[in-house]
Image (cartoon, helix red, strand yellow):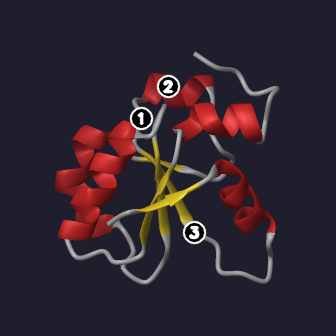
Amino acid sequence: MIRQLQATELQEWLADTTREQPLVLDVREPWEHEVCNIAGSRLLPMQDIPARVKELPTDTDIVVLCHHGMRSLQVAQFLKQSGLERVSNLSGGIAAWAAQVDPDMSQY
């Protein structure tokens, strides 16, 4: 089962300097990332994940995001199956982040 993280929970986590920061893994396409993104996130498009999964840290929490949370859920499940334990999905994706955290963010 993949943990579903709400946008406001991720915002609180990123703002908490006493807590180990997660890798925010954006699995959208480059053009989507250019329109809007969470500062500090790492872009790794979904189709590149299988070939590059070994590049991801095994000792860090990873929060996967996409536009609405469906692609990222698939990637999160793949990462779990690949042996990464500390994986969460951003519920609602970047659209939820824009709606709940950053209403000034560009959307598509």
Residue lying at 57% horizontally and 69% vertically, measured from the top left: 22
Identify the mark at residue 22; answer none if there is no mark: 3
Instruction: Return the x and y of residue 38 as percentages of the image width and height.
Output: 65, 44
Q: Secondary structure at mark 2?
A: helix
Identify the mark at residue 94; answer none if there is no mark: none
Residue with the mark numbered 2:
32
Amino acid carrying mark 2 in the image? Glu
Q: Quadrant of the N terminus?
A: bottom left
Question: Is the residue under label 2 in contact with that under label 1 (CB below 8 Å)?
Answer: yes
Give the class, few, some or many, for how many residues have Cα within 10 Å of label 1's Cα (few <14, many ≥20).
many
Left or right: residue 16 versus residue 9 is right
Residue with the mark numbered 1:
28
Q: Is residue 81 above or below residue 104?
A: below
Amino acid carrying mark 3 in the image? Pro
Instruction: Return the x and y of residue 57 as percentages of the image width and height.
Output: 39, 74
Residue 105 visible in rendering: yes
